[in-house]
Image (cartoon, rainbow, N blue to C red):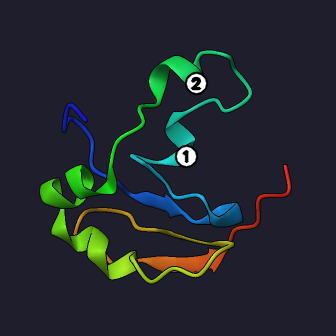
């Protein structure tokens, strides 16, 4: 939310929405991830980057990622099996 990094990864796995600068930037096995991630209303993210609306139609268990803001979103199956 400091707007230092753009959202490049979106997940709708298990019906929950998650958006990150990129999943590679976080160690999800570490307890530190709870301190790194912030819960925000999607409206705040969209206000900073309207291109997020192009993945607002992601079905459950689908994700999308892109290389840069304005780049094409690559969609893929993203189940919440873990």
Q: Which label belongs to residue 74?
A: none
Task: Label 1: state its secondary structure.
Answer: helix
Task: Label 2: state its secondary structure.
Answer: helix
x, y (%) of residue 34? Answer: 57, 22
Q: Which of the two discs, 1 and 2, labels the residue nearer the N terminus? A: 1
Give the mark toward the camera: 1 or 2: 2
Circle 2 sits on which residue? 33
x, y (%) of residue 22? Answer: 46, 48
Quick check: 41 left or right of 65? left
x, y (%) of residue 49? Answer: 18, 61
Position above or below: 14 against 62:
above
Circle 1 sits on which residue? 23
Position above or below: 76 against 82:
below
Q: Residue at x 77, y 58 (%)?
A: 80
Q: Residue at x 63, y 78 (%)?
A: 76
Q: Residue at x 32, y 55 (%)?
A: 42
Question: Callout 2: few (<14), some (14-19), or many (20+) C-alpha neighbours within 10 Å?
Answer: few
Quick check: 46 left or right of 16? left
């Amino acid at each position: 939310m400091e707007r230092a990094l753009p959202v490049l990864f979106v997940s709708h796995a298990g019906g929950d929405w998650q958006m990150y600068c990129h999943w590679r930037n976080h160690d999800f096995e570490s307890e530190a991830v709870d301190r790194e991630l912030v819960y925000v209303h999607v409206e705040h993210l969209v206000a900073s980057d309207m291109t997020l609306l192009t993945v607002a139609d992601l079905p459950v268990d689908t994700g999308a990622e892109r290389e840069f803001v304005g780049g094409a979103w690559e969609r893929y199956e993203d189940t919440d099996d873990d």
